[in-house]
Amino acid sequence: MAHIPTSAAIFSPSVARLASSAAKDWNYVDSWLSSIFPNRSPPPFERNSETLRALVTLSTLNESVDEDFGHVSSLETLALRTLSKAEEYGNSEPKAVHMSPVYAAGRIVAAIESELSREGHLAFDALAATSVELGVAIPVPTGTGREFAHLDMYLFQLEQALSRTEVLHAHVGDHSSRLRSRFDDHERDGYRPSAPLARQNLELQRKIKTETSRLQDIKDAPSVQAQLSKPTTLQLEDDETIFLKLSEYDEALCKQINAFRNLPPDTELAKQQLEILQSELQAATQIRDNMFEGLVEKATPKRSR
């Protein structure tokens, strides 16, 4: 193959056919551009395969639009002829009933539809259906496109809301199934609370009974002393001191009982609540330390160098 020239070695019939087809397309595009720009040269552009493909498509669409415009103009001419004949007929016979505007419009629409192609009928029906759905008497392409854009945006918002609702529904269903399983476990006859919880409950009940009896004795003590002898000032001061201490102890005991009363019956949930409270305590402690450090920095005088 070394003795064969380079031009002959790379020659291929398929490449030649492609080159010939591209040349014909470029001739067609050049003639179309010259018809669009008759008195001046077209704007400069890069002549490559992508540009050729785009220009060929554009020219084809332009020709189809020109054909549609031709059909529309012929239909308008036919409609004008029909109207002129109707006017001549009405003028020639004065007693005849003139066509109403609605009847004339129907005749014009029927004449236009009779001259439309299959694609034209489909486009006409689609435009009519779109106008009815949008509630527009005279549809304008820009207005119709704007309405379609709004509907598309609304559809996207509905899809996003539906997806979020589905995720929320799945989360609620999962949580509900877990609660249902725990409720079923608690409803069973063999369910027993954990041993530490039962022991704590008994201890709290004993402590409450003991303190209640002591409180009752303390409440009854002043009345007994009043029956035996009259109280002195020192006794009243001592009683007041004891009463204040007992009141503080009672408040502390009530706080402890309320803390245990707010805990859920499940051990895991109680641990989770305890962890949440501990994290809140740590956050409050951190805020207190930061405020104290800030106050110390403000109160400390700065040394001049």
Image (cartoon, helix red, strand yellow):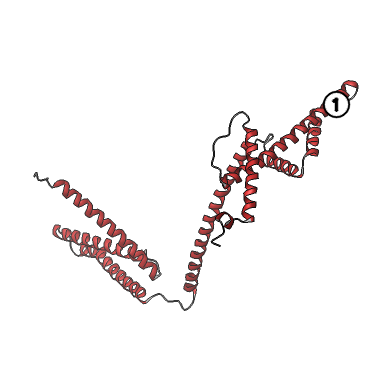
Q: Residues within 10 Å of mark 1 (few under 14, many from 20)?
A: few
User: In the depicted view, which residue is nearer to us: 170 or 303?
Assistant: 303
- Judged left or right of residue 255, residue 95 is right
Query: What residue is shown at x 23% (from left), y 53% (from top)?
Result: 290
Residue 58 screen position, x and y as percent: 63, 41
Q: Quadrant of residue 60?
A: top right
User: In the depicted view, which residue is nearer to us: 179 or 30?
Assistant: 30
Residue 285 screen position, x and y as percent: 25, 57
Query: What residue is shown at x 16% (from left), y 50% (from top)?
Result: 296
**Count of numbered circles on the image:** 1
**Secondary structure type for disc 1:** helix
Residue 191 screen position, x and y as percent: 45, 76
Q: What is the residue that sits farthest to the bottom in this orientation?
A: 190
The image quadrant where one finds the C terminus is: top left
User: In the depicted view, which residue is nearer to us: 167 or 46?
Assistant: 46
Query: What residue is shown at x 77% (from left), y 33% (from top)?
Result: 74
- Judged left or right of residue 263, residue 179 is right
- Residue type highlighted by circle 1: Lys
Residue 213 visible here: yes
Query: What residue is shown at x 50% (from left), y 65% (from top)?
Result: 174
Identify the residue under disc 1. 85
The image quadrant where one finds the N terminus is: bottom right
Q: Quadrant of residue 262?
A: bottom left
Q: What is the residue that sits farthest to the front in this orientation?
A: 3
Residue 94 visible here: no
Q: What is the residue that sits farthest to the left in this orientation?
A: 305
